[in-house]
Image (cartoon, grey):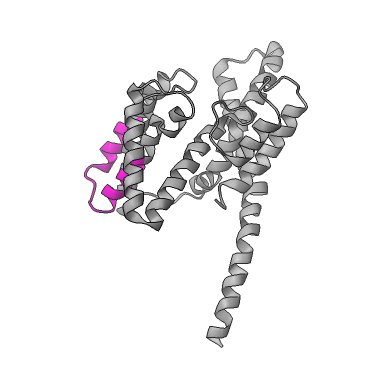
């Protein structure tokens, strides 16, 4: 939660102010209720304030249920098993909110992550390079055929991105275990900044596209050029948000814990 909430709340505050200054930008649903729901990360039927937040709501649900497994394994195992089964069954059922949220097929991606951890911690993975290449190809096909918006249900979007990610992550874990991956400070930094990039990217992409529409009336640049400009701008802004907002917040929140630990250890060492 220390990583999840502080940066989210800061960016939500920024987006809320921007939306308040643009009446009608978020539609009639924008108001105090939608803002409270955004900050509380509770299940909603429609994202109003921050469109990408829908994934975090499912993540919070998973953390809540998984905590039962951590606290009392038999109960947690039963609840998680029933939840995953319900999420699979919902793929062929016509559910409405809140059941379509509670038992979304997207939750099967959490199950795939658990499966990766279980398998890679117990066995060596053969041909990791082939797995990575295959996963990349599956992701490429999924991206090229993606409709450009979220589609609920067990569909090609979920299956394609899910299988591609599972294959790539499994192969990369094995390569890392074999110490065949070169350490890259740049990629490490991008990984650290990934949450900030995730939070801010849609807002920045939207702003850049609006600006590009105006500027391109005079420049007439090819779409592919604007694509890379927008990607660079969104990634750069996300990295800046990480460096100047998220990382300082994390350090600030972690500092009291370190001081407490030192204080508790001081009498023992004396």
Q: Residue furthest bottom?
A: 270
Of residue 66 and residue 268, the one placed in the foreground of this image is 66
Q: Is residue 29 above or below residue 40?
A: above
Residue at left offset 67%, top offset 32%: 33
Q: Quadrant of residue 29?
A: top right
Give x and y (percent) for residue 135.
32, 33
Asked if one can make out residue 179 in the rendered structure from this viewpoint, the answer is: no
Tally the marks. Answer: 0
Q: Is residue 141 above or below residue 110?
A: above
Of residue 26 and residue 215, the one placed in the foreground of this image is 26
Magenta-tinted stretch: 111-136
Q: Is residue 7 above or below residue 229?
A: below
Q: Main secondary structure of the magenta part?
A: helix
Residue at left offset 34%, top offset 55%: 73
Question: Where is the C terminus found, in terms of image quarters?
Answer: bottom right
In reply to whether residue 134 is colored magenta, the answer given is yes
Give x and y (percent) for residue 6.
63, 48
Residue at left offset 38%, top offset 26%: 140
Horizontal arrangement in the rendering, residue 179 relative to residue 60 (left or right)? left
Horizontal arrangement in the rendering, residue 190 relative to residue 238 (left or right)? left
Horizontal arrangement in the rendering, residue 16 relative to residue 104 (left or right)? right
In reply to whether residue 96 is colored magenta, the answer given is no
């Amino acid at each position: 939660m220390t990583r999840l909430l502080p940066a989210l709340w800061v960016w939500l505050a920024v987006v809320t102010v921007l939306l308040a200054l643009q009446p009608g930008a978020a539609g009639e649903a924008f108001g105090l209720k939608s803002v409270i729901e955004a900050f509380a990360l509770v299940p909603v039927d429609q994202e109003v304030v921050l469109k990408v937040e829908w994934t975090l709501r499912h993540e919070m649900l998973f953390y809540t249920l998984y905590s039962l497994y951590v606290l009392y394994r038999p109960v947690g195992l039963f609840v998680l098993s029933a939840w995953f089964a319900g999420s699979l069954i919902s793929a062929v059922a016509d559910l409405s909110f809140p059941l379509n949220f509670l038992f979304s097929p997207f939750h099967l991606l959490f199950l795939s992550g658990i499966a990766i951890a279980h398998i890679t911690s117990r066995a060596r993975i053969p041909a990791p390079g082939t797995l990575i290449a295959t996963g990349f190809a599956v992701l490429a096909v999924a991206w090229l055929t993606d409709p450009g918006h979220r589609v609920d249900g067990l569909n090609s979007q979920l299956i394609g991105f899910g299988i591609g990610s599972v294959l790539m992550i499994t192969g990369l874990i094995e390569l890392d275990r074999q110490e065949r991956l070169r350490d890259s400070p740049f990629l490490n930094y991008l990984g650290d900044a990934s949450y900030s990039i995730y939070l801010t990217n849609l807002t920045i992409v939207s702003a850049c596209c609006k600006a590009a529409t105006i500027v391109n009336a005079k420049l007439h640049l090819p779409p592919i050029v604007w694509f890379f400009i927008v990607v660079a701008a969104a990634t750069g802004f996300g990295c800046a948000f990480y460096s100047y907002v998220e990382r300082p917040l994390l350090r600030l929140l972690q500092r009291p814990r370190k001081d407490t630990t030192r204080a508790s250890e001081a009498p023992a060492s004396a």
